[in-house]
Amino acid sequence: MIELTKTGIDGLDGILNGGIVTNSTTLVSGNPGAGKSILGLQYIYSGVEQFDEKGIYLSFEENESDLREAAESIGFDRWPEHVESDDIKVYDKQVLLRENDFSSSIELLLDDLKNDDYDRLVLDSLTMFELFFDNEKEKRTYLLKFTDILSNNELTTLMTNEQGAVFPDTDIGLENYLTDGNIYLIQTPTDAGVNRYLWVAKMRKQDIETDIYPMEISWGGIDVHENASAFSMMSEEDSPI
Ligand SMILES: Nc1ncnc2c1ncn2[C@@H]1O[C@H](COP(=O)(O)OP(=O)(O)OP(=O)(O)O)[C@@H](O)[C@H]1O
Ligand SMILES: [Mg+2]
């Protein structure tokens, strides 16, 4: 029996037939403003609020107060309390870049992760994490070390990734092979604002719905409309994966 971890976003858990596979790593990909960080905050916040699971949020993009403000602005009112009580542990960019060289900072982080008793982790963003490495070899080495530690410590992980939807003929990066699942957040401009969609493109070991579903960001977080008329962006024959 495969154990599942609920994201806490009802529509998404429905599409995933229950949740993401516990102890796996899922990429959350999308363009700037698509909602990746909000999804990450919601995943960690719901973990504590609904499932009694502690979470770690690593941010290379924002500092702790930015994250707190982002969480509060979307309605995650008790975020600061959970940080205070260590149910949510935040590593912001100041902490993550505490040493002069990036590898030493990462070594410290990896040691911390080994000793901790947490269930969920968000890395925001993988794109930034990778940019700090000087060369490809170092990047691969640390990415592998990192994913190893995540799985040895039974952390169910979301990594945000600054990348639009992948279609046939597009280059697929290393991160797609190192991770178990890939969720794309897609936004298209309209006269009235923006239409948002969510697409679960891949989820190893799981039978998932691969249609594209409308979603909304509002007070309370992300809502995925699992029962709205979903559509397929391409025909069966030229499915992307
Ligand atoms: N309270 C809210 N109500 C409605 N929409 C909101 C609210 N708060 C944020 N948003 C929307 O969420 C989007 C930001 O999402 P988020 O910061 O998660 O994006 P991101 O994918 O992480 O972007 P980036 O790659 O720049 O980090 C904004 O474009 C904004 O329109
Ligand atoms: Mg973000």
Image (tube, rainbow, N blue to C red):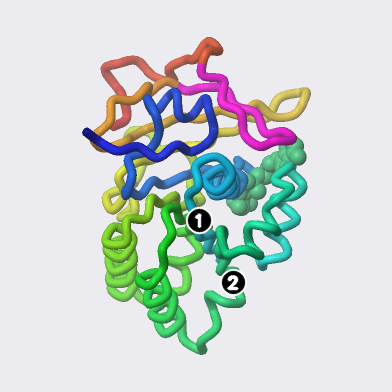
Q: Is residue 221 magenta?
A: yes
Image coords of residue 169 (percent x, y): 32, 37
Instruction: Note whether 210 is above or below 80 in the view shown.
Output: above
What residue sits 50% from the left and 42% below the top? 51
Image coords of residue 10 (percent x, y): 53, 27
Image coords of residue 206 (percent x, y): 28, 31
What residue sits 57% from the left and 77% below the top? 95
Instruction: Note whether 156 is above or below 152 in the view shown.
Output: above
Query: Gap between marks 2 and 1, in whole Å?
Result: 17 Å
Picture disc at residue 55? 1
- CB atoms at circles 2 and 1 under 8 Å apart? no
| Circle 1 residues within 10 Å: few <14, some 14–19, many ≥20 | many
Instruction: Note whether 221 is above or below 44 in the view shown.
Output: above
The residue type indicated by label 2 comes to Lys
Stretch of the chain drawn in magenta: 212-226
Image quarter of residue 218 = top right
Q: Is residue 221 visible?
A: yes
- Of 128 and 39, which appears nearest the observer? 39
Where is ligand 1, by quadrant?
Answer: top right
Main secondary structure of the magenta stretch: strand
What residue sits 61% from the left and 76% below the top? 94
Tell me the quadrant of the picture where the C terminus can be found. top left
Q: Which residue is mark 2?
A: 93
Q: Residue furthest bottom?
A: 100
Left or right: 95, with 178 as reference point: right
Image coords of residue 101 (percent x, y): 46, 86
What residue sits 63% from the left and 62% below the top? 83
Instruction: Note whether 79 is above or below 183 in the view shown.
Output: below
Left or right: 55, with 37 as reference point: left
Q: Of the residues under marks 2 and 1, which one precedes in the sequence?
A: 1
Q: Secondary structure at mark 1?
A: strand
The residue type indicated by label 1 comes to Gly
